[in-house]
Image (cartoon, grey):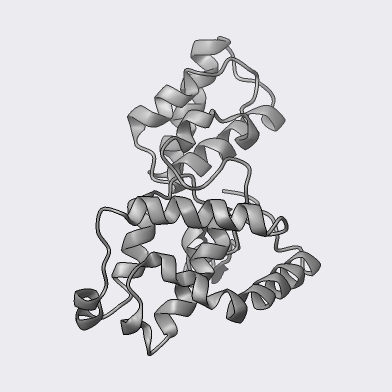
Amino acid sequence: MELNELFAYVSYYYENRFGYFPDKKYWETTYLTLWYLNVNNLNDSEILSELNRHDTIQISVSDLSEELWKNSLTQKGKFYFHHELQIISPAPVFSLKAGASCEEDWCVPKIRFTYQDLVNYFWYKISQTEREIWILGHNTDKEINYLLLRFRNSFQDIDPLDYLMFLLDEMIRDENKQHIKGLISVTDYIGNTLETYRNMILEAKAKGFDKPRWPSCF
């Protein structure tokens, strides 16, 4: 969706709710929130449905309804460090007209990341031979739920989903993973990844990279 189309949604919201356009400080917040929905690939119907849930002078990301995260493994208000749980700004594009690159460094969490997204992430990272060896059947969702609950109960200082994704990466890199018979086997890699993961979080916090980075302008 083009940015001018997003602005049409902003206009729709204020004209229908209030009959006037508010000060810039209010509508810019609403605009940024709609941009967030757009980069998360919500369709027109979903965006309009979300707008119709609100009646305040501005809509911030924190005001979004929990309904948007329904059936998602991600949670509202959470920031994730794994790249698959993020939406990241594209590489800078050089503009002949402007004579410079247009650099917008932003990174925001995904709203939707399902059980199937998690399985697909792993499935498409391994070879055909490895797929034939692996057993990823009807127990996959149960295994994911078990792992998330186990990590939540065992490690109070880390996010279960984020850590599971890092464990999957470790397992994908393992040349001997043909001996593993299910997602549950990621627990064999805890010893190799836990401290590395914790140190990564500490380093990210020290650099201020432990929260969303929003675009500064449009």
In this rendered view, identify the residue nearer to me: 139 or 173.
139
User: What residue sits 50% from the left and 57% below the top?
Assistant: 147
Q: What is the x, y in percent for residue 124?
A: 29, 70
Residue 19 in which image quadrant:
top right
User: What residue sits 52% from the left and 54% below the top?
Assistant: 148
Image height check: is 1 above or below 214? above
In this rendered view, identify the residue nearer to me: 111 or 88.
111
**How many tags in the picture?**
0
Image height check: is 159 above or below 186? above
Image height check: is 133 above or below 70? below
User: What residue sits 72% from the left and 68% below the top?
Assistant: 204
User: What residue sits 53% from the left and 30% below the top?
Assistant: 66
**Quadrant in which the N terminus is drawn:** top left
Q: Residue furthest right?
A: 206
Q: Residue furthest bottom?
A: 175
- Asked if one can make out residue 108 in the rendered structure from this viewpoint, the answer is yes
In this rendered view, identify the residue nearer to me: 105 or 84.
84
Image height check: is 174 above or below 90? below
- Asked if one can make out residue 95 in the rendered structure from this viewpoint, the answer is no
Quick check: 88 left or right of 140?
right
Q: What is the x, y in percent for residue 100?
A: 56, 71
Q: What is the x, y in percent for residue 2?
A: 40, 44
Q: What is the x, y in percent for residue 71?
A: 41, 39
Quick check: 176 left or right of 23?
left
